[in-house]
Image (spheres, helix red, strand yellow):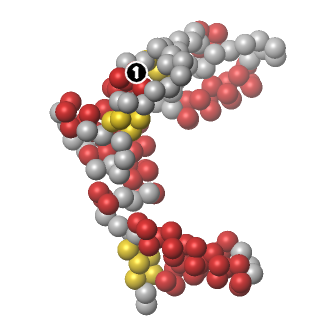
């Protein structure tokens, strides 16, 4: 399991416009190079999806397989209530597109990559503990400071944090 439920307001029916960070960065570069000072440009991308569908895509990418609606709902907290509960954010990015920008990332291809990245950086019980040697932890702590006392304190803090979710072994 993912460890905790994903809060989703309004039963996941609101629509959101999804844009990869790399496409957003390219939009900003386009505006710097070609945009008019004082003009307002919307950065949107034109890819809308309901929140429930986005969460379902993320959960399926996490488990690397299609899942039934019931299984997906086991991971969602539908009791979450957000004041305002906007149903849709819609932006017209045609002025930006007229400058030659368009998004390049494909949502269905990027979500599994993003999920896999986070799974590799933040291991959970579902995909195995990460093992660190005490020597490696000490080196990591020393890289953060050149003061041996601060490094010792950092080492102890890291050790405590890692004990919560990682397997530790010593040499």
Q: Vertically, is 166 above or below 7?
A: below
* Outermost residue to the right: 37
| Residue closer to the observer: 151 or 112 | 151
Count of marks placed on residues: 1
Residue 168's spot in the image, x, y percent? 41, 78
Secondary-structure class at tag 1: helix
Residue under the point 55% across and 30% down: 23
Q: Vertically, is 9 above or below 65?
A: above
Query: Which residue is tagged 1?
Result: 10
Residue under the point 44% across and 73% down: 163
Query: In the image, is 124 to the left or to the right of 17?
Result: left
| Residue closer to the observer: 23 or 12 | 12
**Is residue 45 something one can see in this rendering?**
no
Residue under the point 30% across and 40% down: 75
Residue 137's spot in the image, x, y percent? 53, 78
| Residue closer to the observer: 32 or 118 | 118
Tell me the crowding category of disc 1: few under 14, some 14 to 19, or many 20 or more residues within 10 angstroms, Cα based: some
Residue 5's spot in the image, x, y percent? 36, 42
Could you say which quadrant of the image residue 158 lies in? Answer: bottom right
Quadrant in which the C terminus is drawn: bottom left
**Is residue 123 something one can see in this rendering?**
yes
Could you say which quadrant of the image residue 48 lies in? Answer: top left
Query: In the image, is 109 to the left or to the right of 159?
Result: left
Residue 35's spot in the image, x, y percent? 74, 17
* Outermost residue to the bottom: 171
Residue under the point 63% across and 16% down: 42
């Amino acid at each position: 399991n993912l460890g905790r439920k994903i809060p989703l307001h309004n039963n996941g029916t609101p629509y959101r416009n999804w844009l990869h960070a790399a496409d957003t960065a390219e939009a900003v570069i386009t505006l710097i190079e070609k945009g008019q000072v004082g003009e307002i440009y919307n950065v949107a991308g034109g890819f809308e999806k309901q929140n429930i569908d986005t969460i379902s895509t993320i959960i399926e990418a996490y488990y690397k397989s299609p899942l039934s609606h019931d299984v997906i709902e086991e991971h969602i907290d539908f009791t979450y209530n957000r004041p305002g509960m906007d149903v849709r954010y819609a932006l017209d990015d045609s002025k930006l597109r007229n400058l030659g920008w368009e998004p390049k990332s494909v949502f269905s291809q990027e979500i599994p990559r993003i999920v896999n990245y986070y799974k590799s950086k933040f291991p959970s019980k579902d995909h195995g503990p990460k093992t660190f040697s005490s020597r490696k932890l000490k080196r990591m702590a020393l890289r953060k400071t050149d003061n041996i006392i601060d490094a010792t304190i950092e080492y102890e803090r890291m050790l405590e944090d890692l004990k919560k979710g990682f397997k530790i072994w010593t040499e």
